[in-house]
Structure formats: C-alpha cells, structure tokens
Amino acid sequence: METLKEAIAEKYPKYAARFEELWKEAVDSPMKWENITKVRLQKLVSHLDTVLSPNSVRQYCAKLKAVLNLYSDEVDLPKGYEKILSPKAEKPVQVFLTESELDALIAYEPKSENEKLVKSQFLMGAFSGARHSDFLRFDETNIVGENLEYVSQKTKMRSVVPCKPIVAQLILNTEKRTLPDKTFNEILRRICKAAGIASQVKVFKAGEEKTGQKWEFVSSHTARRSFATNLYLKGLDIYTISRFLGHSSVEMTAQNYICAEIRELSDEVKKYFE
C-alpha cells in the first residue's frame, strides 16, 4: 500500500511538499498513516489556522480529508476525523497591528540576523499587502514609478499598489531567505512582545474564544490583515483594498481581512445619532 506521503502526492502533486512541511511544523511525529490521531489532526488544523487564511485552511483540510476517505477501507483511521477536517466557515476575530504598533516594530532593534529578517519581511507585507510567497520574490523591477507591481504566485492575479518608501527600501535591502512558518511566527511574536505590542485582546478562531496580549496572536498573515484594516480605517473603499490584496471577491476581503468592526464616523453621520 502507498505511504501517506505518496497518497497525497498522487492525488494532489502540487500540494504534497507543502502538506509535509505543514505537518512537520504542527505535529511531533512523521507524516505516516499510523501517526494519524484525532489529537494530531487537531494540532494540524490549529496550525493551519495560524499560518493560512480561513479559505486556505478549508481547502487544505478538504484535500487531506479526501485522501483519508479514499484509503479509509485500507487504513485504521480515528473515528471522527471527518469532523476535525471540516472547519466551519465562521468569521474569525483576528488581530491587526495599528499604525503606532507598526511604528514600534520599525523602531525595534533586532538582536540577530533572523530577527532582522522577520522584522523586515513582516513590515514589507504590512505596508504592501503582499503575501509572503510574493514579496520574497520582489526586486527593483517590481518598483514601477510610484507603484509596486507584481503577479501573485498563488492566484496569478496582477496587483498594483502604491509603493511606500519603506517598502522600496526593504525590497532593496532585505535578504532573500525563507524561514519555516513556525520559526517565523515564533520570532515575530518575540519581537512584537519586545516592541511593547502587548494590549489586551480577545480573539475568536477555530471555535474558541481566547484572551491575552496582542503579541501572542500575531502571525505572518497579520501583515496582510494590518494592511487591509489600516487602509479601511483611513476611509479607503473595500473594493480598492480588495484589488490591492489580489482577491477575487470583495466578500473575502470584508470577511477575513478587515479586523475592525467600525471606523471613525464622519461628522455628518455623528449628527444623525445626536
């Protein structure tokens, strides 16, 4: 019989390497049939929720569930695995970094080369809205006049975003090196804590409500959420924000990337409520 790795590779060849990487980051055992337990599957889903968008989490879960269903007559699988791999399409309450918190991160002095790399990469995403997989490929050719132009690796959609000076500097000066998601997020949380990003927050994701300091809930994907939410709070329309992010629908932007419930009301709207 095929190994779990081979089974995934046969059905989803483009996702096989990424599945193994995500499993390794989330679970303390090799990716094998005999190591599939409810606890490990839950760890995997929780990790996916940290490093991927909600839509991507559902896609990865659906693919793994399809592979397990295909081999369910040949492999002893834990009862209820289907439920664990069927996350609800609920709206999670996520965190974003405010402009002042991003300023605090800019001012933070890295203690190592990895801290310097993570800080630079996160800020590049927070001020451009680009995915990690996209801005790792940026070079001076992506800076066209006053804009940043690129085609997303994931969606193949073209994005044109005004290029902040700090983004241009980061593109030219940041080392082209990738860290594993788990390592990236651990370092990011450490430097956010050191930078004083510690306000009390309440989040809701994966069916759980959690309270803690903001740095505890920051991840690589917080960069894109920060970009979208800060622009929203400044009054930019959702459609334009969605275009900047390279989304195929405004609904995806509104549901998963705008972390503030309401922005400051205009004087006209305030008068209405007087």
Image (spheres, grey):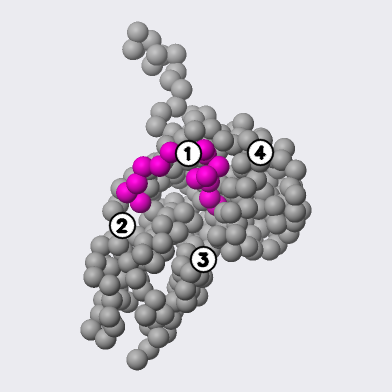
What's the CA distance linking mark 4 and mark 1?
16 Å
In magenta segment, residue 156: no
The residues colored magenta run: 206-220
Q: Residue at x 66, y 53 (%)?
A: 118
Q: What amino acid is found at the position of numbered circle 4 in the picture?
A: Ala
The x, y position of residue 222, in whole percent, is 52, 46
The crowd level at tag 1 (other Cα within 10 Å; few <14, some 14-19, many 20+) is few
Give the number of the mark in front: 4 or 1. Answer: 1
Secondary structure beneath label 4: loop
What's the CA distance linking mark 4 and mark 3?
26 Å
Q: For this view, does 80 lie left or right of residue 112? A: left
Q: Which mark is residue 195?
A: 4
Q: Counting residues from the N terminus, which is met first, the one under dot 4 or under dot 1?
A: 4
Q: Counting residues from the N terminus, which is met first, the one under dot 4 or under dot 3?
A: 3
* CB within 8 Å, label 2 to label 1: no
Q: Is residue 87 above or below residue 165?
A: below
Secondary structure beneath label 3: helix
Secondary structure beneath label 1: strand
What residue did someone put label 3 on?
A: 25
Q: Is residue 212 above or below residue 21?
A: above
* CB within 8 Å, label 1 to label 3: no
